[in-house]
Image (tube, rainbow, N blue to C red):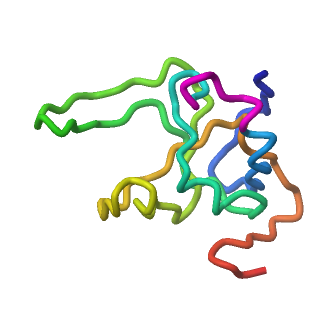
Amino acid sequence: MKETITKLRPGDFVEVKAPEEILRTLDADGTLDQLPFMPEMVEFCGRRFQVSKRVVKTCYYTKAGSSGMRKFRTDDVVLLDGLRCSGAEHDGCQKACMIFWREAWLRKVEDGVSTQFGRP
């Protein structure tokens, strides 16, 4: 089940949906359109953040040392201001990668109040 939002823009405020809502959007591999919802993302559920950028493509690197460019098949991926992966569920990885969010995992809010990093 995929819920669509009108395209989010940088500066919009969103609330990350509850884990139960997000889980309903995922396939058997834990992805939505091949983008995984990672365990590190759960801590942000129920909190509000500001959209910093829309994402169309990104670079990637593999353990084998190869790299490339990945273009997303859909245009519903955004970055949220200041959020990075803690690596806690990936053997303590310390790369602090940006976290990609599908719009279906987010709910646009109008009051513009951010609860990022525990602030009201």
Q: Within the magenta stretch, is there residue 25?
A: yes
The secondary structure making up most of the magenta span is loop
Q: Position of residue 97 (x, y in %)?
A: 38, 54
Side of 79 relative to 12 (left or right): left
Q: Quadrant of residue 114?
A: bottom right
Q: Looking at the image, which residue is at 66% across and 61% down?
A: 44
| Residue lying furthest left | 65
Side of 34 relative to 91 (left or right): right
Q: Position of residue 61 (x, y in %)?
A: 22, 38
Q: Position of residue 58 (x, y in %)?
A: 36, 36
Give the answer, above or below, for where 102 lies relative to 10.
Answer: above
Give whichever of 101, 90 is nearer the camera: 90
Q: Within the magenta stretch, is there residue 68?
A: no
**Which stretch did the figure color magenta?**
23-30
Q: Looking at the image, which residue is at 40% across and 31% down?
A: 57
- Position of the N terminus by quadrant: top right
| Residue lying furthest top | 73
Q: Looking at the image, which residue is at 66% across and 72% down?
A: 116
Give the answer, above or below, for where 55 lies relative to 32.
Answer: below
Q: Looking at the image, which residue is at 34% across and 63% down?
A: 92
Q: Position of residue 16 (x, y in %)?
A: 73, 52
Q: Quadrant of residue 24?
A: top right
